Amino acid sequence: MIEQGGVQHCQWVNPSPILLMKYLQFKSKLGWSLSNLVAFLRWNLFTYLDLWQWIDNAFDVVPLAPQSVQLTLPFAVCGQH
């Protein structure tokens, strides 16, 4: 037996990524096709980019340098010497 809550959950979760992609496609000034937009987003998934600059002009935006978040330990005796 199928639970009604599970079916309603699937009805809202499944179209969410498509709606997000359609919104990005609508806001873009470049005129992306949906398949190209999805492919280029996957290709640039782990780069630091300003999304709105990239969506309008994907070929001229330079990736941002990530800030270092490595903290130093306050103990001088810990670690390798």
Image: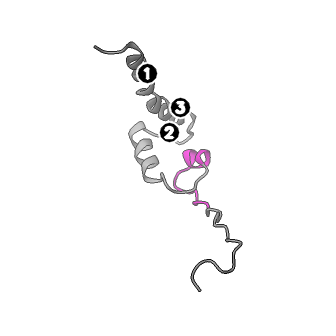
Determine which quarter of the picture holds residue 8: top left
Instruction: Residue type at mark 1: give it.
Output: His
If the image is split into quadrants, where does the N terminus sit?
top left
Secondary element at image label 2: loop
Identify which residue is drawn at 67% across, 67% down: 71
Residue at numbered disc 2: 31
Say if mark 1 contacts mark 3, CB within 8 Å: no
Residue 2 spot, x, y in % from top left? 31, 15
Label 2 Cα crowd, 10 Å radius (few <14 / some 14-19 / many 20+): few
Above or below 65: residue 6: above
Q: Which residues are magenta?
A: 51-64
Q: Nearer the viewer, residue 56 or 48?
A: 48
Residue at numbered disc 3: 23
In the picture as drawn, the residue positioned furthest to the right comes out as: 74
Instruction: Residue type at mark 3: give it.
Output: Tyr
Q: Nearer the viewer, residue 6 or 59?
A: 6
Taking 72 as reference, is 39 left or right? left
Residue at numbered disc 1: 9
- Report the Cα–Cα distance between label 2 and label 1: 32 Å
Above or below 13: residue 74: below
Determine which quarter of the picture holds residue 6: top left
